[in-house]
Image (cartoon, rainbow, N blue to C red):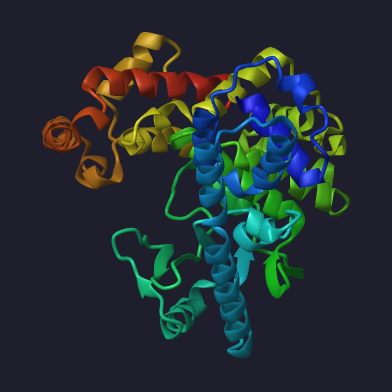
Amino acid sequence: MVDLLFYLAKCAIYRIKPTDFKEKFGQKSIDWDSFFKLAIDNNMITLIYSIILEIDKENNILNEQQRKSFEVNAKATLIPELQKFYLVSQLAKASEERGIRFVFFKGVVLADLYPQYVERVSSDSDIYVLDKYRESAEEILREFGYIIDPADSKENVKVYIHKNPKHMVELHTKLWEDYKGPRIDILAGLGLTDEIIRIEACNIPLYTLNHENHLIYQLFHIIKHFSLEGIGARYLVDITLFINRYIDQIDIDEFWKKIDKLGYTKFAEVFFSICMRSLSMDTRIMVGHRRLPDDLVDVLMTDLFHVGSARDKEARWQIMGAMEAYFTGEEKVSKTKLGKKIRMAFPSAKAMPKVYSYARKYPILLPIAWIHRDFKFLLKKIVHRNDFYGVGEKIEVGERRLSLLEEFGLIDEE
């Protein structure tokens, strides 16, 4: 089904007629209900909507109920997306009038790359401001009806919600949020916010990161999600369109030097290999690097199919805290499968989620933190029941994720 999703996405982003659909997929039995769920989970239903309609018109692939469900899901995002872009334009204008530079990244900048910008459905908008302007920036958000969400806000990322129309803004004073560790130190040293450029995206004049640094940031963001919970296929569409649009404005040698410093080279090679194979990404980005063999590429493709192995259940967030120390480089991974499982069951103080900060500060309290964690687990298990990982299952999921990160060179061995 992933091959079908990429086929439809490729037709959509390049406006290619799906004339070979029957040749490629006509002999396969397609569970369209499961496919629609896959497309929705990957935020791609709106993108492929017109292509599906075209194929259905020629081949009668859907029943009436599926057509209606597909249409409702695809069109449900259109008006909300337009409302979000209006709010973004108002924020950009207001910030400029106040002399406060709002630097937009991801969201609106990536949407501009799509044939129709409403085809990229997004849940939020990310804005970077200098720390000295944070209070003024928050004042602008409040004036436009945004209300802070203290539960999801962090020291370096304040989350603001606009209820009607629904829109979330993440206001960053650091691109790497509140994460700390050796790899975060390297990222901070790259100066990704040193060069800010002016562009027009989705008919909105705004500031953003220069294209080379924006690409590096996007890979950091993708790897963060891949490390902690898994990623969806939409990220590959974003990166493909970004590179295709801005390849001539990226210093490829410098880009790869920075990616190598971060330890992201192998992952980037695999990721780009998928983009080239499935979405016809510009191959010049891989100058000096090799397209990786299909067997390694298929490992990531399989993970994408499940939108990350940790996303098999609604309670996927359960292993995120345990994975954070590996993502930031604070913790090294065991070489053995048994060692990985033991680390998931009895993590070090550095690998304990931040909620157990007392164990991080005073490692002697680590056994108490393990008991505290287990007690919280029992309470949550009662509430979540079947949607909550059991102890053994959680260890298995964590071990698989660590093995996957190890295979892509994203964590260091002991």
Provide residue 116's location: percent of width, then percent of height.
72, 58
- Please name the residue shown 49% across and 35% down the image: 37
As drawn, which residue projects farthest toward the bottom? 97
Residue 45 seen in this snapshot: yes
Provide residue 268's location: percent of width, then percent of height.
68, 33
Q: Is residue 382 left or right of residue 219?
A: left
Provide residue 203's location: percent of width, then percent of height.
73, 72
- Please name the residue shown 58% across and 85% down the image: 94
Q: Quadrant of the C terminus?
A: top left
Residue 350 seen in this snapshot: no
Pick the residue in front: 285 or 262: 285
Compared with residue 215, is residue 387 higher up or lower down, i.e. above or below? above
Occupied quadrant, residue 393: top left
Q: Is residue 117 left or right of residue 223?
A: right
Occupied quadrant, residue 114: bottom right
Q: Is residue 348 left or right of residue 399?
A: left
Pick the residue in front: 312 or 352: 312
Q: Is residue 25 left or right of residue 229?
A: right
